Image: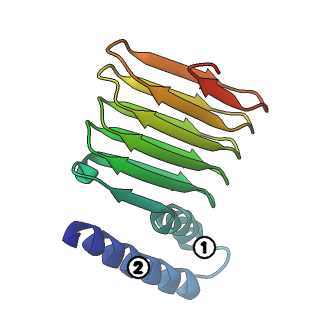
Amino acid sequence: MNKIMNKVIIGISLILLVGFVGACSSPMSPESDSASAASKAIAGVSNTLVSGTTAADVAPVVYGGGFIFVVNNGAHVAATQSGLGTIDIVNNGGVLAATNTGTGTMTINSNATGAVAVTNTGTGNVTVNATGAAAIAIVHSGDEDFFYPAR
């Protein structure tokens, strides 16, 4: 809990610092462009919620107004959300990577011991229930909802 609070406090401090730097820069200066990019990256910090016994082994990245929620009791989780979608992960298994560039919601529940990689570039929702020892790689690019395993 202390680690999460420290990250929140650091994130808030950085947001305030970037806001101050942005306010002091002229609109046409390179510094304002850097401050703007940093502000967008840092703003994503507030759009993530990570918990679980191995929460420290989660690497969430949010670009835009999306969200990432992870409960990690397994191996490493890397989650990248670009845009307005949401990634919701419960990992009790092996290594897991999730990338969502669409506006839909990715819901991933895994107790698989094999690596799991899920990518969504469409606007549909993706639901994955991963089990077993074999590696699982899913790429979805459609606007319809997708389920693994298929219903």
User: Could you tell me residue 80's position as x and y percent?
Assistant: 50, 44
* Labels in figure, total: 2
- Label pair 1/2, CB-CB below 8 angstroms: no
Quadrant of the drawing holding the C terminus: top right
Quadrant of the drawing holding the N terminus: bottom left
Q: Is mark 2 on a helix, strand or loop?
A: helix
User: Could you tell me residue 113's position as x and y percent?
Assistant: 29, 22
User: Could you tell me residue 25's position as x and y percent?
Assistant: 56, 82
The residue under the point 49% across, 29% down is 129
Is 14 situated above or below 147? below
Of the residues under marks 1 and 2, which one precedes in the sequence?
A: 2
Left or right? Give the position of 73 relative to 80: left
**Residue under label 2:** 12
**Residue under label 1:** 29
The residue under the point 22% across, 51% down is 53
The residue under the point 38% across, 73% down is 11
